[in-house]
């Protein structure tokens, strides 16, 4: 059972062919990072034009790499939201054209669900219920998964997403885009206890997040130091900020475990590639007889394989999209 997964929601043009839900036959990503780097973030207009340039090549490479013909596919799965509207439209229109021409059904995939389903590629025997900490460039959600397609969002960020905060702080520290990997790299040479940035826990029992205060504290520390002519060390700032972000993510996740009694947790989204987050949560859950699951780093950030994985489970449920499928930039998980 072959699924072609297509992803164009942000700045990665990606496609992958997945066999029987776990066997990745090909996996192609054309990243626009170098194009957007000089602006310090993704420029939507440029992103959609870049997708148009690379779409066909990426899909053909994925099909050739898997050594399959379009007619062999059981379905084509494509991200239709959330994301940048112009970027999404390229993927949706392209996937429709291929599916129609090949006489293959189309499946619309939610990008957030796809991030979660990256876990099923490597851990096919995951059992429900489980919790998911979805930490990406635009989202920070704690989710209770009751079954395939059956989700409850228990908490979410009230301001910045974790990845967004990392990207903004990285930019201020002159570390470049995308910020998460750069902060992690710089932090390796720093002291995580050098600065005590605030960890917003919100109301007692709340599973929501807030990262904007923490982010402002870094900017204030930098500005105050600059006015006094003091040069703060970037590694110490990066390490302390990374520690503060991870502390909040870990404490909220453990609170969700406590409140639900569910001890199996999945990490999803680009920030799930973070070593400190993986290590800390793995350790904390072990102490509570729980377990942490996460995809390899290259399947945490945007890719076509996770879309194919979510598409595979939609296929099993015979959940196909009509030819009128449209991009939904603000698509929710539930
Ligand atoms: P969304 O999925 O919410 O629509 P997105 O697709 O742009 O947003 P992802 O591709 O899931 O986001 O993740 C990108 C984010 O992950 C960026 O904010 C990036 O800084 C962060 N990130 C990537 N690697 C790491 C890492 N090793 N440590 C921390 N953050 C990381
Ligand atoms: Mg990206
Ligand atoms: Fe993403």
Image (cartoon, helix red, strand yellow):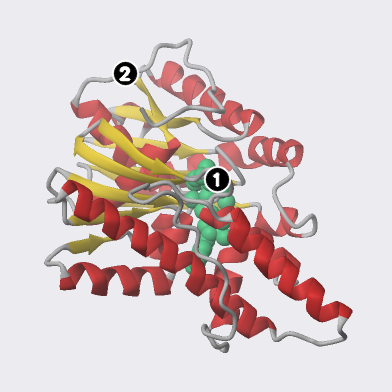
Task: Name the quadrant containing residue 323.
Answer: top left
Q: Residue at x 28, y 56 (%)?
A: 255
Q: Residue at x 37, y 47 (%)?
A: 206
Q: Name the residue carrying label 2.
A: 320
| Mark 1, secondary structure of its residue | loop
Q: Position of residue 83 (x, y in %)?
A: 56, 35
Q: Residue at x 44, y 37 (%)?
A: 111
Q: Is residue 131 left or right of residue 300?
A: left
Q: Residue at x 55, y 38 (%)?
A: 8
Task: Name the quadrant containing residue 84.
Answer: top right
**Quick check: can you spot residue 208?**
yes
The residue sitting at the front extreme is 204
Q: Is residue 49 left or right of residue 305?
A: right
Q: Is residue 261 left or right of residue 139?
A: left
Q: Position of residue 171 (x, y in %)?
A: 72, 64
| Mark 2, secondary structure of its residue | loop
Task: Please tell me whether residue 160 is drawn above or below residue 241 in the rendered image.
Answer: above
Q: Earlier in the sequence, mark 2 or mark 1?
A: 1
């Amino acid at each position: 059972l072959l699924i072609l997964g297509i992803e164009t929601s942000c700045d990665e043009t990606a496609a992958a062919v997945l066999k029987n839900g776990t066997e990745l036959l090909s996996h192609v990503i054309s990243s626009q990072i170098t194009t957007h780097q000089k602006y310090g973030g993704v420029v939507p207009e440029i992103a959609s034009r870049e997708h148009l340039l690379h779409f066909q090549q990426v899909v053909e490479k994925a099909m050739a790499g898997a050594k399959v013909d379009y007619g062999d596919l059981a379905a084509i799965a494509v991200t239709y939201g959330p994301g940048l509207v112009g970027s999404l439209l390229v993927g949706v229109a392209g996937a429709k054209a291929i599916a129609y021409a090949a006489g293959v059904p189309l499946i619309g995939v939610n990008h957030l669900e796809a991030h979660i389903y990256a876990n099923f590629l490597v851990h096919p025997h995951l059992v429900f219920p489980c919790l998911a900490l979805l930490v990406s460039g635009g989202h920070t959600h704690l989710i209770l998964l009751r079954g395939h397609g059956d989700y409850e969002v228990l908490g979410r960020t009230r301001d910045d997403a974790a990845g967004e905060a990392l990207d903004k702080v990285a930019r201020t520290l002159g570390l470049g885009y995308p910020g998460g990997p750069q902060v992690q790299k710089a932090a390796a040479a720093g002291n995580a206890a050098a600065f005590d940035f605030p960890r917003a826990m919100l109301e007692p029992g709340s599973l929501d997040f807030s990262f904007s205060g923490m982010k402002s504290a870094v900017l204030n520390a930098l500005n105050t130091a600059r006015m006094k002519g003091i040069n703060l060390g970037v590694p110490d700032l990066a390490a302390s900020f990374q520690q503060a972000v991870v502390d909040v993510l870990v404490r909220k996740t453990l609170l969700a475990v406590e409140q639900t009694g569910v001890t199996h947790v999945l990490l999803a989204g680009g920030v799930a590639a973070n070593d400190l987050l993986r290590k800390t949560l793995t350790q904390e859950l072990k102490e509570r007889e729980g377990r942490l699951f996460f995809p390899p780093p290259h399947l945490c950030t945007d890719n076509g394989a996770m879309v194919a994985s979510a598409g595979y489970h939609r296929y099993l449920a015979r959940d196909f999209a009509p030819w009128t499928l449209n991009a939904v930039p603000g698509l929710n998980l539930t």
